[in-house]
Image (cartoon, grey):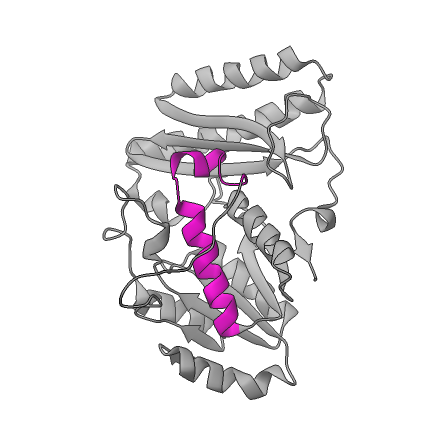
Amino acid sequence: MNIITNTTELRRILAPVRQRERIAFVPTMGCLHEGHLSLIRKAKRLADIVVVSIYVNPMQFGPNEDFDAYPRTFDQDRELCEKEAVDIIFHPQNLYPADGMKISLKVNELDNCLCGAARPGHFDGVVTIVNMLFNIVQPDIAIFGEKDYQQLAIINRMVNDLQMNIEIVAGETVRETDGLAMSSRNRYLSQQDRKNAVFLQESLKKVTEKIKHGGDDKTSLKNMLNDEKAWLESKNIKVEYLEMRDAASLTLIDELNHTPARLFIAAKIGKTRLIDNIALEHATIDMSDSVTETRV
């Protein structure tokens, strides 16, 4: 396994490989867990060469967010990648010009909801760094997890809008045995908060089950979501949003029979903000036409 910190060196190594082998790319900010490893394993199945980037991107952190506190566990991450037979770790110290970025990408509309509403500029930072990494690695395939579904939808749209010759492949959310979505943030949960965190997935399942057996009355959906929010609040969970949205456009849905659709939640448990989402089980969702895989 090669560990490369220099853009020029990475391009030099990949140039001859690109002519004869398929390259898969898994971009991360490190602090790897089983969710990341599942993406790496998927990349191994789909390509000949797997490149994993580990880079904590300052541009996607807001002024009051935890850039300096974000866990940096490179030695542990390196060992995990080695066990998974990753070919290359790209671990640059800094990818931005010394005098700051003068040109960057901007997300329109897709970032004014869900996590983007609470984190202005976050997804501009995401698409800018992902575009930069795509230009450096020039992969055939890039793998992103469904847990950060808004990010997945935005990256997919970026690839389509900017005519990038990259296949975006989604990896299913990996969960703990009790259903909690794996996240580097889970480590910040107290023992009691960790017990309460499982209610997020339980709520998503309850709502999807109700929707599956419901009609198409707008009031029913609104009441259903409000009731579930109230139940979560009774468990000392501060709900930021609990919404049903179109799986591709992320537009808000007010009907029970919409397809394809997903249910999204974000909440603070103690001091830790967690997110999760689930595809609506009543819908027949063809993700090839939305965000799972696109070949331009």
Q: Quadrant of residue 3?
A: bottom left
Q: Quadrant of residue 80?
A: bottom left
Q: Is residue 230 left or right of residue 281?
A: left
Q: Is 127 colored magenta in this rendering?
A: yes
Query: Please, is residue 172 above or below residue 52 in the view?
Result: above
Q: Who is closer to the viewer here, 252 or 107?
A: 107
Kindly tell me whether residue 1 is visible in this rendering. no
Residue visible at 32% across and 55% down? 58
What residue occupies the far bottom of the structure in this picture? 16
Quarter of the picture holding the N terminus: bottom left
Q: Who is closer to the viewer here, 163 or 292?
A: 163
Residue visible at 57% across and 12% down? 223
Quarter of the picture holding the C terminus: bottom right
What residue occupies the far front of the structure in this picture? 102
Q: Is 197 colored magenta in this rendering?
A: no
Q: Position of residue 287 (x, y in %)?
A: 70, 47
Q: Quadrant of residue 129?
A: bottom left
Query: Please, is residue 223 above or below residue 187 in the view?
Result: above
Q: Position of residue 79 (x, y in %)?
A: 37, 71
Q: What segment is highlighted magenta in the picture? A: 109-137
Residue visible at 73% across and 25% down? 257
Q: Magenta region, mostly helix, strand or loop?
A: helix
Kindly tell me whether residue 239 is visible in this rendering. yes
Q: Position of residue 103 (x, y in %)?
A: 41, 60
